[in-house]
Amino acid sequence: MRLPSDGDHTGRTLGDEEIALLAQVIRSGTLNSTRGTFVTRFEKEFAAWLGSKHAFACASGTAAMHCCIAALGLRPGDEVITTPITDMGALTPILYEGAVPVFADVDPRTLNVTADTIRAQCTQRTRAIVATHLFGLPCDLDGILALAADRGLPVIEDSAQAFGATWRGRKAGSLGALGAFSLQQGKHITSGEGGIVATDDDALARKVFLCVNKAWGYGDPKPDHYFPALNYRLTELQGAVAVAQLPKLDHVVARRREVAAALREALASVPGLELPHDPQHGTHSYWKFAFTVDPLVIDGGGLALGKRMQADGVACAPRYIQKPSFECELFRDWTKSPVTLLPLQHNPRGAGPQPPFSRAGYPGAVQALERVIVLPINERYEPQHVAHVAAVIRNAARGLARG
Ligand SMILES: *Cc1c(COP(=O)(O)O)cnc(C)c1O
């Protein structure tokens, strides 16, 4: 069975609405956002949807994270606490701003960082916390926001995977000092590439705006380039698509929640699987249906089960990103690039054992990656797709069951 894929029209909600607005942009002849209207309209409508005061669109989720980090005005060697299970686009911006990404372990059941794992990594140099709502499951924000408030640290919610997830009734990305989202092809809504940053803080908003715009003070009495920043603007073409996508987002999230509920029901009786669900105080928005596999019950664990699913035509990603982020080539030798070298030259970790992070310190992340299977789902899944996927998983699990 061919399953709807978010890589093309079968698993996306793109249609006549996007085409109509794109045509307007082309006919207008204005393709850039400094003169056009669609990007600013998307920013206004997204802020209203999220419940935040400001929102600024930009070129990617990576750019969104970069603008968040840059808006904090860090010094060389400052530390930003983040997660070892994330997209690299959430990590490199920390280095580009001269700071050291410090990794907090994850809870192997949720794959998210927690207040406890973050606290364990706090030092005198900690300047910010990134809370990544992985796969659409909100982090336990009560503890994280309390810890951050206690230490006077801003929280950046990396909500690239968590459009429409909620915590105590508020949308993910609107609870921390800053929220970052991605509009890349595979996210809940898309303009091909793109991103957006949200904040309620006027001063941070001003900085984010400048970070998107080469730090040029548009509209100021005597504008100048105030600090080093890149051109991270979204085009009007992308803005038009994003404007058309936004009204569909609530439906996308609701449909994904339905699909996830159906999958959970169909898999409930399979021994050895830990299935994703809403946290106690929030709601999951199911960017993916990520579940973990107990290797004591299912022989070979997540890797073996995932391989069988793939062999039976169900695309999935056992181990997600394969290894903790700090084991990627760029972190192995921090002296190779000025981007990695500078932060460490200004941080005591530079004088310690190299590389500064290793898997011995991350039992939660190691176990999580060993056990997780990331199953793609999307809003176009119908009951027959769910039934097929569930049957393949049940079969594969039965074939590998121990005892
Ligand atoms: C996708 C993603 C990003 C980066 O977004 P891009 O648009 O691909 O640059 C950052 N963080 C997380 C958690 C993501 O899933």
Image (cartoon, rainbow, N blue to C red):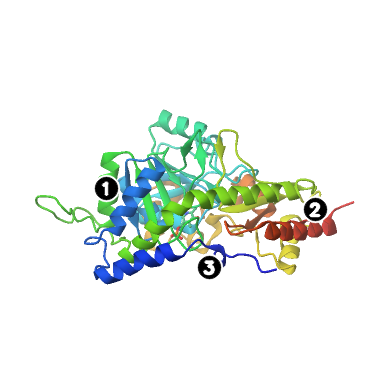
* Alpha carbons under labels 1 and 3: distance apart: 37 Å
State left or right for residue 1 relative to residue 56: right
**Sequence-first tag of 2 and 1:** 1
Q: Which residue is mark 2?
A: 298
Q: Is residue 212 left or right of residue 278?
A: left
Against 179, residue 28 (above or below) is below
The answer to whether the residues at label 2 and label 3 have Cβ atoms under 8 Å apart is no
How far apart are labels 2 and 3 at the CA level?
35 Å
Q: Secondary structure at mark 1?
A: helix
Q: Position of residue 278 (x, y in %)?
A: 61, 40
Nearest to the observer: residue 277 or residue 324: 277
Classify mark 2: residues with Cα within 10 Å, few (<14), some (14-19) or many (20+). Answer: many
Task: Name the amino acid, label 1.
Answer: Lys
Which residue carries the number 3 mark?
A: 9
Instruction: Give whichever of discs 2 and 3 has the lower sequence position.
Output: 3
Q: Nearer the viewer, residue 120 or 129?
A: 129
Check contact, mark 1 vs mark 3: CB within 8 A. Answer: no
* CA neighbours of label 3 inside 10 A, class few (<14), some (14 to 19), many (20+): few
Question: Badge 1, how many Cα within 10 Å: few under 14, some, many 20+?
Answer: some
Instruction: Pinpoint residue 260: horizontal percent, then vertical percent.
Output: 64, 49
Residue drawn 33% across and 39% down? 200
First in sequence: mark 1 or mark 3?
A: 3
Task: Tell me if I can see residue 286 in this picture.
Answer: no
Give me the disc on residue 207.
1
Q: Secondary structure at mark 3?
A: helix
Amino acid under label 2?
A: Ile
Q: Which residue is rendered at x = 78% and y = 48% of the image? A: 272
Spot the residue most to the left.
Answer: 221
